Amino acid sequence: MYDIAYSLEKALRESDEFKTLKSYYNSVSNDPSSKQLFDSFRETQFELQQKQVMGEEITEAEVHKAQQQFQLIQQHTVISKLLEAEGRMTMIINDLNKIIMQPLEKLYGVPEEFK
């Protein structure tokens, strides 16, 4: 099973989707202003996700900050394309995860809240 998992990892790394993602990431990383904007956006995302996981309330100011950053990101062509490519990779990985989890789902069934 582990050999197959490593083969799958290699296939993902060699996929056009990953190569596209990596290209956009490198473009953003090589431009200091783009990198700063992207890093700030990711940091805000991470902080809000952490608060959500911990059950902490997200303030209106934090929501406003995130919205402003998202608007800036949308106006930045390369970062927008990076996020789109990331979304495609996430979708592929989620699809693969669903496939991998099928034996357990068939064995245990799927709880109603996940259907």
Image (tube, rainbow, N blue to C red):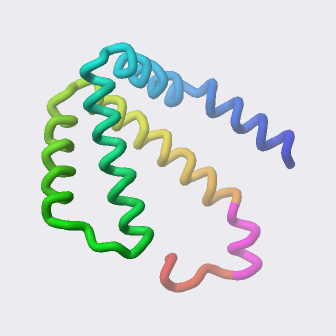
Residue 104 magenta-highlighted: yes
- Residue 63 position within the rendered picture, expressed as x and y whole percent measured from the top left: 18, 59
Relative height, residue 50 to residue 29 (above, below) = below
Left or right of 90, for residue 39: left
Residue at horizontal 63%, vertical 24%?
14
Residue range corresponding to the magenta coloring: 101-108
Judged left or right of residue 75, residue 97 is right
Q: Main secondary structure of the magenta part?
A: helix
Of 45 and 16, which appears nearest the observer?
45
- Looking at the rendering, which quadrant does residue 47 occupy? bottom left
- In depth, the one of 97 and 68 nearer the eye is 68
What residue is at 38 percent from the left and 60 percent from the top? 49
Picture coordinates of residue 107, whole percent (x, y): 76, 78
The residue lying at 35 percent from left, 37 percent from top is: 84
Q: Position of residue 54 (x, y in %)?
A: 43, 71
Residue 46 is situated, as x and y percent measured from the top left of the image, at 39, 51
In this rendering, the answer to whether 96 lies above or below 42 is below
Q: Is residue 54 above or below residue 88?
A: below
